[in-house]
């Protein structure tokens, strides 16, 4: 929540992936929805209730993923006697040169509308009485470490922009992703400034551009604290044996330690009953987890670790999070 407030005050927006119902999540969603440059995106699926909530919050733009979603959004907006601002997420069929599980811009991926079919969908959007076309959205993947995929995708988006202009459809912004990579091991991602310059040199005139740097903003926002138990030198590599399991590939966690710093000063009232900073005895729902691709002989699988079993492969269900009780002075 504090991170959401921080980034919105800096002029950045956030994507909202659905609506949550704990008091803490409500506050975060409230902050996010009321930021003027927010795009509302729940990846593939948005429910009618989520659409209605976003419309009532006067968000900046819906990123539409399909023709069916566009039609539903028009109906929901009509019921509220509102006009829904939209960008259509297009799939440019560009290889992001990242891990296949986080690649979103190839024609075989489920994300977005085939860029060749986008003009027809934009024409349909322009005909609908409760839809207002604002922009073009494109996101090709996460953890990108080269500029060429960004530029390839942008080239195709700009061709679509020309097509839409010839059809008399005015575009007011471009929303470009995916996420700029960070260094985990030997990666050498481009600097954010180089990334921005590579995009801007192709953008015509003063057309506003929204970018989605992703983990490049947040990857260094936390630390993992563990204790070194032994040093183990070998002929090929030196190892530190620790009491945490976030950094190994065993199928069973052996226990790990995390230290979390929450900037309470960046938050206000969660609701009428809770005041920050919390007092001793305050109960909060907290989830800590990770996903990892586990390689096997001739195959791979995705493994999910959480600090408490909640029976779902979705880490975005606050009702399933374990409850912690704050102690101390």
Image (spheres, helix red, strand yellow):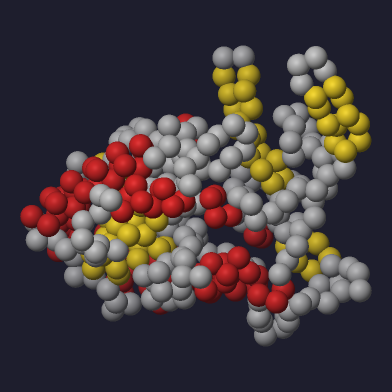
Residue in the image at 46% along x and 65% along y: 13
Please determine whether, in this image, residue 248 is positioned above or below residue 162: above
The count of marks equals: 0
Please determine whether, in this image, residue 117 is positioned above or below residue 21: above
Viewer-closest of 260 and 299: 260
Q: Which quadrant of the figure has residue 117?
A: top left
**Residue 107: percent from left, percent from top:** 32, 34
Residue in the image at 91% along x and 74% along y: 329
**Residue 69: percent from left, percent from top:** 32, 56
Q: Is residue 26 visible?
A: no
Q: Is residue 290 left or right of residue 307?
A: left
Viewer-closest of 273 and 160: 160
Please determine whether, in this image, residue 14 is positioned above or below residue 313: below
**Residue 319: percent from left, percent from top:** 66, 60
Q: Is residue 185 visible?
A: yes
Quadrant in the picture for the N terminus: bottom right
Viewer-closest of 51 and 160: 160
Residue in the image at 70% along x and 41% along y: 305
**Residue 122: percent from left, percent from top:** 19, 55
Residue in the image at 29% along x and 57% along y: 174
Please determine whether, in this image, residue 250 is positioned above or below residue 212: above
């Amino acid at each position: 929540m504090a991170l959401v407030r921080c980034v919105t005050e800096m002029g950045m927006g956030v994507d909202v992936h659905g609506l949550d119902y704990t008091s803490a999540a409500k506050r975060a969603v409230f902050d996010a929805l009321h930021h003027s440059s927010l795009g509302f995106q729940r990846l593939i699926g948005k429910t009618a209730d989520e659409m209605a909530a976003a419309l009532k919050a006067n968000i900046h733009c819906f990123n539409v993923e399909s023709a069916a979603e566009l039609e539903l959004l028009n109906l929901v907006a009509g019921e509220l006697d509102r006009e829904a601002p939209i960008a259509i997420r297009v799939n440019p069929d560009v290889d992001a040169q990242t891990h296949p599980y986080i690649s979103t811009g190839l024609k075989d991926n489920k994300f977005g509308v085939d860029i060749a079919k986008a003009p027809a969908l934009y024409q349909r959007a322009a005909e609908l009485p409760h839809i207002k076309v604002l922009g073009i959205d494109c996101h090709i993947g996460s953890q990108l470490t080269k500029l060429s995929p960004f530029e390839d995708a942008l080239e195709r988006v700009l061709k679509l922009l020309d097509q839409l202009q010839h059809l008399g459809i005015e575009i007011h912004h471009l929303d470009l992703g995916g996420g700029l990579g960070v260094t985990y091991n030997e990666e050498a991602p481009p600097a954010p400034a180089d990334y921005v310059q590579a995009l801007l040199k192709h953008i015509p005139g003063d057309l506003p551009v929204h970018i989605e740097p992703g983990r490049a903003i947040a990857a260094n926002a936390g630390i993992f604290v563990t204790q070194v138990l032994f040093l183990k030198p070998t002929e090929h590599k030196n190892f530190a044996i620790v009491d945490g399991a976030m950094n190994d590939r065993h199928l069973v966690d052996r226990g790990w330690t995390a230290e979390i710093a929450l900037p309470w000063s960046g938050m206000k009232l969660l609701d009428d009953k809770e005041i920050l900073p919390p007092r001793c005895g305050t109960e909060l729902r907290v989830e800590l987890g990770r996903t990892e691709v586990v390689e096997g002989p001739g195959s791979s699988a995705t493994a999910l670790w959480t600090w408490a079993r909640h029976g779902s492969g979705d880490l975005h269900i606050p009702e399933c999070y374990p409850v912690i009780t704050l102690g101390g002075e």
